[in-house]
Image: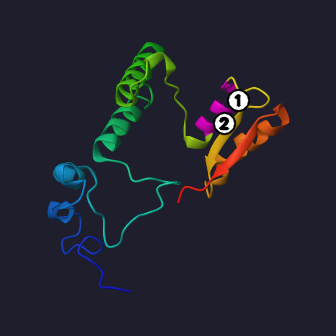
Amino acid sequence: MGKVSAVARPEKRGYVDPSVYDDTPLASHAELLAREFPRRGEGVFLNTAAQGILPQRTLAAMAEFEGGRQYPNRIDDDHLAEIERICRERIAALVGAPARQVGLATNTSDGINIAALHLPLEPGDCVLVPKGEFPANIYPWLALRRNGVETVFLDTN
């Protein structure tokens, strides 16, 4: 194994020098990344499938939202609907889709299950899935076999 770089073991805990992104596609976002994802010690976190690291602005928004749920306060339904509408609009703008076609789910596995159950797939249709995908992202498509839908695994190398 080679020498561990400054990215993996920064000298100042809680800080990553934005210059580590020089000559990478992330260079133009270096300051934002350093601000949103401050380091909390040594090492690199790679398991984002189960529990990804949240940006600082997300943590702040979550804390503000959860603060509204403290007794005796209550978040009213109109406010929740407004938050959902804003989320759908922002996601739609990000992916280039109409907001009415944006679905929200608690996590990727739930979202894939919802898609598998509600897409208008018919007998003879084929779903393409990358080989080596996480099981929770495969099983919903395999379950469609009972409806005559084929799942094909693609080599993505």
Residue at position x 33%, y 34% in the image: 64
Residue 75 appears in the figure: no
Residue 114 magenta: yes
* Quarter of the N terminus within the rendering: bottom left
Q: Which residue is mark 2?
A: 113
**Front residue of 41 and 146:** 146
Can I make out residue 116 in this image?
Answer: yes
Residue pointed to by mark 1: 117
Q: Secondary structure at mark 2?
A: helix
Amino acid type indicated by mark 2:
Asn
Give the left or right position of residue 117, taking residue 60 as reference: right
The image position of residue 10, as x and y in percent, is 23, 72
Up-down relation of residue 6 to residue 103 (above or below)? below
Q: Is residue 53 above or below residue 74?
A: below
Between 143 and 90, the one lying in front of the other is 143
Q: How many marks?
A: 2
Residue at image point 44% right, 13% down: 78
Residue at 55%, 41% in the rendered image = 107
Which sits in the foreground, 63 or 50?
A: 50
- Dot 1: element: helix
The percent coordinates of residue 34 (x first, y second) are 21, 55
Magenta region: 110-119
State whether the magenta stretch is mostly helix, strand or loop: helix
**Residue occupying image coordinates x 85% and y 36%:** 146
Residues tagged 1 and 2 counted as in contact (Cβ below 8 A): yes
Marks 1 and 2, how far apart at CA: 6 Å
17 relative to 48, above or below: below
